[in-house]
Structure formats: C-alpha cells, structure tokens
Amino acid sequence: MGMTEYKGKIERIQDTPFGYTISVIGGKWKMVILYLLAENRVVRFNDLKRQIGTITYKTLSSHLKELEADGLIHRKEYPQIPPKVEYSLSKKAETLLPVLEELCEWGVKNRPGL
C-alpha cells in the first residue's frame, strides 16, 4: 500500500494512516521529546527544556499538551509546593520507538558529509 493510497482509492494525505502518523509526531520538536523520554524514562519539564536547549517554554508546553492529547505521553502531577510534574512515554508511544529508531538509522546512513 502506497503512502497516499488507502482502501484502494487516492485520498488527501492527512486522511491516510501516514498522514495521521505525521500529524502526531511531526514538527520540529515532538520526535526529540519522545526520544528524550525514551532515553530517560521519566523527565520533568525543566529537565526537558534544559536538554533540548533552544526550544521555548511556550513551544515545549504546547508540544507536551499535544503529545498527551494524542495519548503518547503521561503527565503526572504531584500535589506539593513548588509543583512537581513528570512526563513519561505511554504504551502507545513505546510502539513508535522501533519506527523512530529506523528513522535515526536512515539518517546515519544518508546524512551528507559522513
């Protein structure tokens, strides 16, 4: 089955399984966030911000909310002062890890200048 073909007919890309996948993990930072959560298991907001570096607080917050809404991450809030919030991958996101590994391998093999 091709990337734009689904159920025997050509559809708009966003209406295909491929389009859905890209909408969930696409963008500049979502795969980076998923990678960091996979590497560290549980990460707090400020630790994510520090590890990514150039992302703004607003963008990080927005992406975390989107990933949570899509069921890819868990957000655990502890009732304490100051507030403590931890993020981790969901089971759904763990099924994406082999795909992300393959994308990384493709980059290793095809990156110019290496």
Image (cartoon, grey):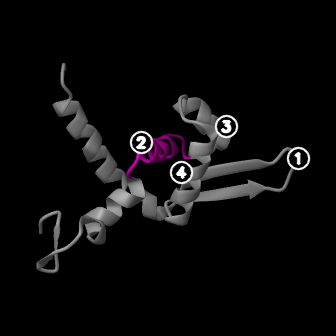
Q: Please provide the residue range marked out in magenta.
A: 26-41
Residue 95 appears in view: no
Q: Which residue does the image show at 26% across and 63% down from the upper left?
A: 18
Counting residues from the N terminus, which is met first, the one under dot 4 or under dot 3?
3
Label 4 to label 3: alpha-carbon separation: 14 Å
Residue type, label 4: His
- Look at the picture and state if 17 lies above or below 25: below
Front position among marks 1 and 2? 2
Q: Which residue does the image show at 55% across and 28% down from the upper left?
A: 53
* Residue 81 horizontal/vertical position (percent): 88, 47
Dot 4 alpha-carbon crowd within 10 angstroms: few under 14, some 14 to 19, many 20 or more = some
Residue type, label 3: Asn
Location of mark 2 (residue): 28
Image quadrant where residue 35 sits? top left
* Residue 59 horizontal/vertical position (percent): 56, 44
- Look at the picture and state if 3 lies above or below 53: below
- Look at the picture and state if 99 lies above or below 53: below
Location of mark 3 (residue): 46
Is 113 displayed left or right of 80 in the figure? left
- Look at the picture and state if 14 lies above or below 84: below
Location of mark 4 (residue): 63
Residue 92 appears in view: yes
* Residue 6 horizontal/vertical position (percent): 18, 75
Location of mark 1 (residue): 81
Q: Which residue does the image show at 54% across and 35% down from the upper left?
A: 55
